[in-house]
Amino acid sequence: MNPPPANALVTGQRILVSAAAAGIGRVIAETLHRHGARVHACDIDEAACAAFRAANPDISMVRCDVADADQALEWVEDGIARLEGLDGLVNNAGIGGPTGRIEDLDPADWKRTIDVDLNGMFYVTRGAVPALRESRDGSVVNLSSLAGKFGFAGRTPYAAAKWAVVGFTKSLARELGDVGVRVNAIQPGNVEGPRIDRVIAAKAELRGESPEALRERVCETISLGRFVTAQDIADTALFLMSPLARNVSGQIIAVDGDTQMLL
């Protein structure tokens, strides 16, 4: 593994990143490590965990379902022990949940979405906060979504959870400010990759149109006319974890190309 760059922004920081074996979480974990952080990560997908370990031998990675309170706490405690303390937490774990009209949704799908996207964030953060208080210069970054900013027809479980993340973030920033711990949230827009492709396909089917036509209409709602990348999100998380953001807390930061609405 190459040494961090001379201008590494988070050198020596000890950071937990959830759902980091693939997608946005993986890019966040790798970016933080590249800039000097010691990272302990988790993911629910064991095969993805194994692939991540092979590619990133200097980042510890274990399997964990953060929606299980016991597993979440075990992961956090393991990370604090391995890292010998804690300076940062990235709550990235989340699922898209079902797509459908409210009357057609299975309550089990609703519950699973809330369990992963909101309750898991609570379980992890609850376990991490005592160590973050000791840091007195800690940072928490929660992943919300533009579904936590706009109404999102057909995606009510996901939107409900992501709006709740905003309230959780704002409240926690107030609660931890007196010990110097900053808490912010990122609201990614449409992030290029297989996940948004699946979402667009499901929404298009619900509306009786082609995925290509829906994607084109989605781009028309974005001032920059394009989707963002996982690296865009990771760079924002890096900034929020770094000393450059020492006076940034309680903020909900959209990285979305100036999206005006969700279709």
Image (spheres, rainbow, N blue to C red):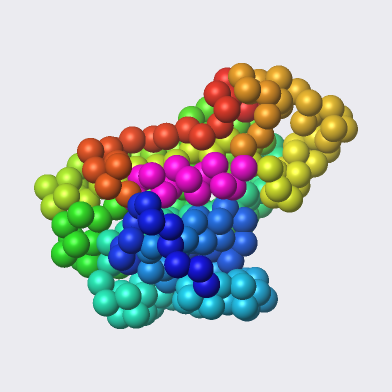
Q: Residue at x 16, y 64 (%)?
A: 134
Quarter of the image where one finds residue 23: bottom right
Image location (x, y in percent) of residue 239: 38, 44
Q: Residue at x 60, y 31 (%)?
A: 152
201 vs 40: above or below:
above
Magenta stretch containing residue 230, yes or no? yes
Prevalent SS, magenta region: helix
Magenta stretch containing residue 3, yes or no? no
Question: 173 left or right of 1?
Answer: left
Determine the residue located farthest toward the left in the rendered image. 178
Quarter of the image where one finds residue 154: top right
46 vs 143: above or below:
below
Question: 247 left or right of 229?
Answer: left
Magenta stretch: give its range.
Answer: 229-241
Image location (x, y in percent) of residue 60: 47, 76
Quadrant assignment for the C terminus? top right
Residue 213 seen in the figure: yes
Residue 145 seen in the figure: no
19 vs 49: above or below:
above
Image location (x, y in percent) of residue 245: 29, 41
Image location (x, y in percent) of residue 243: 27, 47
Q: Residue at x 58, y 35 (%)?
A: 189
